[in-house]
Amino acid sequence: MHQRAATQNSDVVRRDWKTEGAKLLTGGNRLDTGAFANGWFHEPTIFGDCSAKMRIAQEEIFGPVVSLIPVNDFAEAVEVANGVPYGLSLRFTRRT
């Protein structure tokens, strides 16, 4: 995917998170000054309070974006991971 198209895709997804109820924890801005002035770059971005059904959790964003989806146990984490039609990644941690 061309970088401009990827950046535009990221822009659309970033607008959708508000209407879906996710919380922007950090990042989310386009980098377009200094060393980034001649490219199509975004800050690393983390969304919280996501659900597995949200667009930002279901689609490939083609940018440095992570969606945090809380689950209750390992079985639910596997169910969430298997509920995505793409080979997106998963990390499971637990509070002790």
Image (spheres, helix red, strand yellow):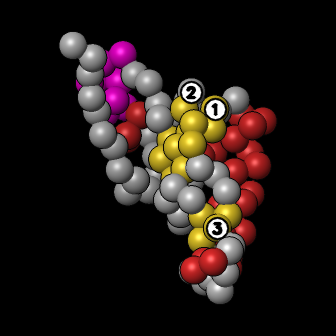
Quote the CA–CA distance across marks 1 and 2.
Answer: 6 Å
**Horizontal side of residue 44 vs 56, given as left or right:** left
Which callout, 1 or 2, points at the residue further toward the start of the chain? Answer: 1
Q: Secondary structure at mark 1?
A: strand
How dense is the environment of label 2, judged by Cα within 10 Å: few (below 14), some, or many (20 and up)? Answer: some
- What percent of the width, then of the height, locates residue 38? 65, 86
How dense is the environment of label 3, judged by Cα within 10 Å: few (below 14), some, or many (20 and up)? Answer: some
Q: Which residues are magenta?
A: 72-79
Task: Name the residue rendered at 64%, 33% in the picture.
Answer: 22
Task: Name the residue rendered at 47%, 35% in the picture.
Answer: 68
Which callout, 1 or 3, points at the residue further toward the start of the chain? Answer: 1
Task: Name the residue rendered at 35%, 50% in the picture.
Answer: 89
Q: Is residue 60 visible?
A: no
Quote the CA–CA distance across marks 3 and 2.
Answer: 25 Å
> Which kind of residue does numbered mark 2 sit on?
Asp
**Disc 3: which residue:** 31
**Disc 1: which residue:** 23
> Which kind of residue does numbered mark 1 sit on?
Lys
Quote the CA–CA distance across marks 1 and 3.
Answer: 20 Å
**Horizontal side of residue 53 vs 13, given as left or right:** left
Q: Nearer the viewer, residue 27 or 62?
A: 27
Q: Quadrant of residue 1?
A: bottom right
Q: Is residue 67 magenta?
A: no
Q: Is residue 17 above or below residue 88?
A: above
Q: Is residue 86 visible?
A: yes
**Disc 2: which residue:** 49
Q: Nearer the viewer, residue 61 or 28?
A: 28
Whether the residues at callouts 1 and 2 have beta carbons within 8 Å, the answer is yes
Image quadrant containing the C terminus: top left
